[in-house]
Image: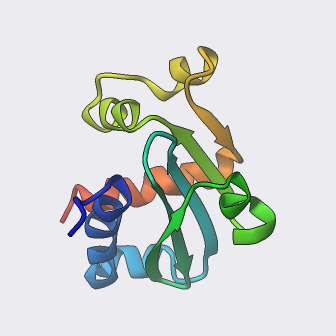
């Protein structure tokens, strides 16, 4: 049996929002996909928000084509190492500084603002 990876943690962290009325109401009209890719892990996580429902799919991140926008249809993505994701989650690292240092790759900041809004709702659980 394999050890749990970062993508499994994303599933456990975000899918309980399906029982959160504030989440359902706030995102009832939204449809978007966000790719969260820890580059040093075997799997990326594709977070799918579809009119107040949230689903997370684990996706092999190698070969690189597996996680391309053409294949997955994501609207925004964020990529860095597992350690830096953890540092951002704990507040030790600031995303803006990591982008400037080219240690954090971000595509479509508007969608990532929605990701931040989703994250803030998990903290209210």
- The outermost residue toward the front is 1
State which quarter of the image contains the N terminus. bottom left
Instruction: Tell me what residue is drawn at x 25 percent, y 64 percent.
Output: 2
Q: Quadrant of residue 106?
A: top right
What is the x, y in percent for residue 88? 36, 32
Instruction: Tell me what residue is drawn at x 50 percent, y 55 percent.
Output: 115
Q: Quadrant of residue 118?
A: bottom left
**In the image, is residue 117 above or below residue 32?**
above
Instruction: Tell me what residue is drawn at x 56 percent, y 23 percent.
Output: 103
**In the image, is residue 9 above or below residue 16?**
above
Q: How many marks can you see?
A: 0
Give the side of residue 104 with respect to residue 7, left or right: right
Q: Nearer the viewer, residue 44 or 33?
A: 44
What is the x, y in percent for residue 117? 44, 55
Q: Nearer the viewer, residue 91 or 5?
A: 5
- The outermost residue toward the right is 70
Give the side of residue 74 with respect to residue 104, left or right: right
Here the colouring is rainbow
Instruction: Tell me what residue is drawn at x 69 percent, y 52 percent.
Output: 64
Q: Nearer the viewer, residue 12 or 29?
A: 12
**In the image, is residue 12 above or below residue 83?**
below
Q: Quadrant of residue 111?
A: bottom right
State which quarter of the image contains the C terminus. bottom left
Give the side of residue 94 with respect to residue 120, left or right: right
What is the x, y in percent for residue 52? 47, 83
What is the x, y in percent for residue 93? 37, 22
């Amino acid at each position: 049996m394999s050890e749990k990876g970062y993508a499994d943690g994303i599933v456990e962290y975000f899918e309980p929002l399906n029982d959160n009325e504030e989440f359902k109401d706030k995102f009832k009209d939204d449809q978007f996909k966000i790719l969260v890719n820890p580059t040093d892990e075997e799997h990326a996580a594709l977070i799918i928000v579809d009119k107040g429902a949230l689903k997370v799919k684990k996706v092999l991140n190698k070969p690189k084509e597996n996680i391309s926008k053409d294949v997955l249809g994501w609207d925004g993505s964020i990529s860095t190492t597992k350690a830096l994701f953890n540092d951002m989650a704990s507040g030790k690292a600031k995303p803006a500084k990591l982008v400037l240092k080219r240690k954090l790759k971000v595509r479509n900041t508007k969608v990532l603002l929605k990701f931040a809004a989703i994250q803030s709702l998990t903290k209210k659980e």
